[in-house]
Image (cartoon, rainbow, N blue to C red):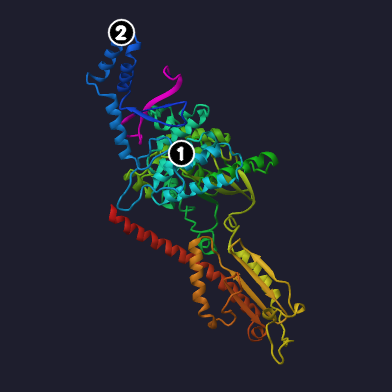
Amino acid sequence: MVDTDSNVGRHWGYFRDSPDQVPEYVVCADSSRECKFDIVGYSLFQVLESRLHKRRSTLDASKAVDLQQQIEARRGKKTISRAQSEAALRVKRAKDCVASSLHQLGIVVPVDTKTNTGYRELPTTGKDLADLLQQLKQDTDKKSPRRKRLGELITRATIASDECDFGTGLLLGLDVFTAGSSLEKEALQLLRVAYMLLRRANFYKIASGQCKHRNDDDPSICIGSIIASNSKTEENKSKQSIQWFPLESSPDVMNAYVSRMGFPTNQFSFCDVLSTEDWALAMVPSPVVAVILLYPIKPHTEEADRKEAAKIDKEGQIESPNVYYMHQTVGNACGTVGILHAIGNMHHLVELTPGSFLDKLFTNTKTKTPDEIGRYLEEDDEVHQNTRASCLKGFTAVRQKLQLETVNDPIITHFVCFSCVDGSLYELDGDSRKGRPINHGPSSPDTILQANTLAPYLSSIRSSLDSALCLRNFPSQTVERHNKPEVELQMSKELLLNPVLICRNEQEKCLIEPSINSTRVSICIKKADEIETILSHKFNRFLMQRAEQFIIMRRVPVEGYDMSFLIVHQHLENMYKHKLIDFIITFMEDIDKEISEMKISLNARGRIVATEFMKQFT
């Protein structure tokens, strides 16, 4: 509406902190102020009555009386002083707020005073944050210091959310949202997680919908849909797209799910892949006909998907006509679509139950397009009921019982299937992120899990050591009647061979330094995260204190490496060369496995301790 007093556009609406909350305030914003809201009353009728009283002198007397009677008939005869009600509402709001926000209404989130969780303050708030966001609106450089500063704040808010301070992400998300469409990607990233954790999923739908109709020329509406909305989401459920409750990533749940749909789990079944390391992959039964991956949706994963799709559009790819592929047309059905992709590309290896859902699905959709298969799934009530039944098992059932999740909660994870078809590995994602099967090159059921394991790394080390351990008895040229390891002395360059550096990744590497009478082998143990770094340090210290028990181990490793072996010609005179190489290779395998097991054990103990700790507050 346009205010005749100031000739500016104004937006009025009820304000609430949660979708299920009864509105307590009416707020107003105008286009002359950037996303600032004022509390003007407790109901629209009361606000209208107040404004009518203010303009009574400028209205026709009979018209004013008629309007007053209509208002009273709607809200009752009792009147409240506008000034007093506004003052009382502002005081109440100030007491309820956990933190102030750029839109001046603050935020209200649950705070546990016993555990001091719910909200933590970021280093940049208030005017400093407002100045930063204003500068970012004009900043097009994605690598500027200001962008980096905002990225650090988002990281801090994400960490806070992981530690149950949900209000931090909510406040930063709302503040960033006020900056306009240039930062809406970052804002929605924060709000999606915050609203999910606070069980306010409907607000995220409103925010994401508002992004399609934003008008940066009128900043007063930039968050109007979030905080000044009458929230008709519940009334419009029938107009929304179909949503299923997401499937749990659990072998027990998935095996029961496909069994009800007619798949013989006594021939093939789902199992967990605990790690991509050799010790974990060895636990997976073979052959592996498909892998279903659950991963968190992040901005960098979305960007990678777009780049990959653009590359295929430009360069093309080889695609087998025998790939079974479908589109996902139902919300939260990525788990079901991933399972159907897996079974659809291997069902010829098993005998499906005649007349079952899977049997009818693959029979009736042989000649259909991916979109038609997706519609077929959407219209089949049997699979929907099976999905709901599967959600009543596993940890999902516990979360539903405790009302920690609803079908409308935003989902920040996604299922995708990898399957071997006609000798190639295909990535099958029914979502619009990819929109087609992605051919990742040659593979087979026997090698699908072996692409990035420890074996190639150790094989390279073994072959290099076999060539480097050709040592001879060579007396020292600097110390009379002594043999000194030339690789340690580094005195005569003509006695040293070129070193070989073998890397598995940025953290794991092996340096082999051969010479005429000695070879030094230095290794860096994996340190993928802080836990592995600590465990590696403790494990190395334990071994170095017992270095004398290992004939070829140096007590002090080469700088920059975790441990070193020194092999001289006497070792080859007393031991078989292949036995020495086997010892080093086995030693590296055991260290890799030991640190992995220690990490799993530590995480398991951490979960047990956290569970016992939280029992004190439930």
Residue 437 shown left or right of residue 99 in the figure: right
Q: Position of residue 376 (x, y in %)?
A: 50, 33
Residue 326 visible in rendering: no
Question: To which quarter of the image does residue 6 belong?
Answer: top left
Front-most of residues 333 and 11: 11
Picture coordinates of residue 25 (x, y %)?
33, 30
Q: Secondary structure at mark 1?
A: helix
Please give the range of residues in magenta: 3-25
Residue 144 at least partly seen = yes
The quarter holding residue 484 reads: bottom right
Q: Residue lying furthest right in this view?
A: 494
Q: Secondary structure at mark 2?
A: helix
Q: Earlier in the sequence, mark 2 or mark 1?
A: 2
Neighbour tally class for label 2: few under 14, some 14-19, many 20 plus, Cα within 10 Å: few
Disc 1 marks a residue whose amino acid type is Asp
Mark 2 highlights which residue? 61
88 lies left or right of 179: left
Q: Nearer the viewer, residue 198 or 140?
A: 140
* Residue 280 horizontal/vertical position (percent): 51, 62
* 368 up-or-down from 142: above or below: above
Is residue 233 shown in magenta? no
Please give the name of the residue rendered at 45% of the width and 44% of the height, measured from the top-left corner. Answer: 125
Q: Nearer the viewer, residue 461 or 303?
A: 303
Residue denoted by label 1: 175
